[in-house]
Amino acid sequence: MHLVEFTLTKPPEAPEPSSDELIAALRAVCRPDDGVEHVRVHPSRAGARGAVFLLAPDAASAVRQCRAVFRRALSVSEALRGWRLAHPVAG
């Protein structure tokens, strides 16, 4: 299992969702092959920071899997409209 830390930024005018809302937005797009085991998130006025625990063969794969989950969540979630993944940087 690998830990991947993340940082999300949000537009200044976007509402501040709760950690439960953010986790729900991420869980809604998770697929079995993403390997997501656990998500912790801490919202702030600027966005959110957190960590994802993923089953992956190595750290680089875990980061790629994390990015894929966030790409999907940011593209479909109303709660994350206009948000951006700042770390790990999309690659």
Image (tube, helix red, strand yellow):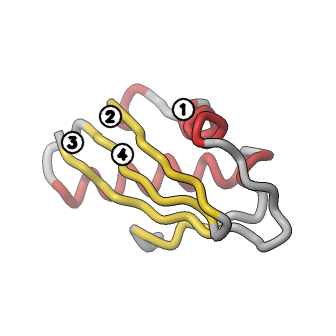
Closer to us: 30 or 81: 81
Query: As displayed, is residue 43 above or below residue 26?
Result: below
Amino acid on which disc 4 is placed: Val
Residue at the image point whose x is 80% and y is 56% from the top: 15
Task: Give the residue at mark 1.
Answer: 27
The spot of residue 5 in percent (x, y) is 34, 58
Amino acid on which disc 2 is placed: Gly
Relative to 38, is 69 on the left or the right? right
The spot of residue 25 in percent (x, y) is 63, 38
Q: Residues within 10 Å of mark 4 (few under 14, many from 20)?
A: many
Amino acid on which disc 1 is placed: Arg
3 or 1: mark nearer the eye: 1
The spot of residue 86 in percent (x, y) is 51, 73
Secondary-structure class at tag 3:
loop
Which numbered dot is residue 56? 3
Task: Give the residue at mark 4.
Answer: 52
Secondary-structure class at tag 4:
strand
Mark sitting earlier along the chain (2/1) = 1
